[in-house]
Amino acid sequence: MLSENIKAVRKSKGLSQAELAVRLNVVRQTISKWEQGLSVPDSDMLISISEALETPVSVLLGETLVKPEADSLKSISEKLEIINLQLARRKDTRRKILRGLLITLCLAITAAAAVLIALNSPYLGWDYSDPETAVAGAAFHLFEWLFVRLAPFILAAAIAGIILTRKKT
């Protein structure tokens, strides 16, 4: 993949991300994002990278050619479009997973609240002279106390997350 190839060629040339960034007139974080696969350079930048690393664009894109040929801007653009589509799919999958986890969290908080309401604080009627019951009652009370204070904030944050991760059309 492009990200791995940029990193491998950069390291083989003995360059740091900062040094490559200076050669390309970009910030080091841009190089880092390319190498992590979080973004991809446009076709003009890809040509600049290949010149800075003294490596053919085809090598950066993962092709091994028997004889070097001049890379056409069209083929580079097509390959970058494929990489962009892969990144978009990966981002969409992550968004769906996060949304599912947030929905599950909301359901779990709602279910826990329903159970606590149905139990109506049973620890108040427990026999605290028995050490096991005393420990269990104190632990249950602590859980209920924390839940009542934290659950509304967590639920609100999860609902906000669900709204923010909805698919925009």
Image (cartoon, rainbow, N blue to C red):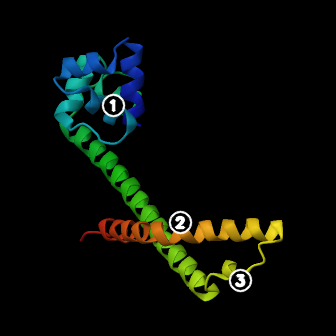
What amino acid is found at the position of numbered circle 1 in the picture? Ser
Q: Which is more N-terminal, label 3 or label 2?
A: 3
- Name the one closer to the observer, 131 or 156: 131
Image-quadrant location for residue 20 = top left
Which element is circle 3 on? helix
Q: Residue at x 26, y 69 (%)?
A: 168
Task: Check the picture and name the quadrant holding the C terminus.
Answer: bottom left
Camera sees residue 93:
yes
Q: Which is more N-terminal, label 2 or label 1?
A: 1
> Going by the image, does 136 lie left or right of 95?
right
Q: Residue at x 37, y 51 (%)?
A: 86
Q: Nearer the viewer, mark 3 or mark 1?
A: 3
Q: What's the distance in space between the residues labelled 1 and 2, CA to CA?
A: 41 Å
Q: Residue at x 32, y 53 (%)?
A: 85
| Percent x, y of residue 109 | 51, 74
Q: Residue 146: which disc?
A: 2
Camera sees residue 62:
no
Q: What's the distance in space between the residues labelled 3 and 1, CA to CA?
A: 59 Å
- In the image, residue 129 sits, relative to residue 27, either above or below, namely below
Q: Residue 32: which disc?
A: 1
Image-quadrant location for residue 160 = bottom left
- In the image, residue 116 sits, relative to residue 164, either above or below, namely below
Image-quadrant location for residue 108 = bottom right
Q: Which residue is mark 3?
A: 125
Q: Residue 5: which disc?
A: none
Which element is circle 1 on? helix
Q: Residue at x 57, y 77 (%)?
A: 112
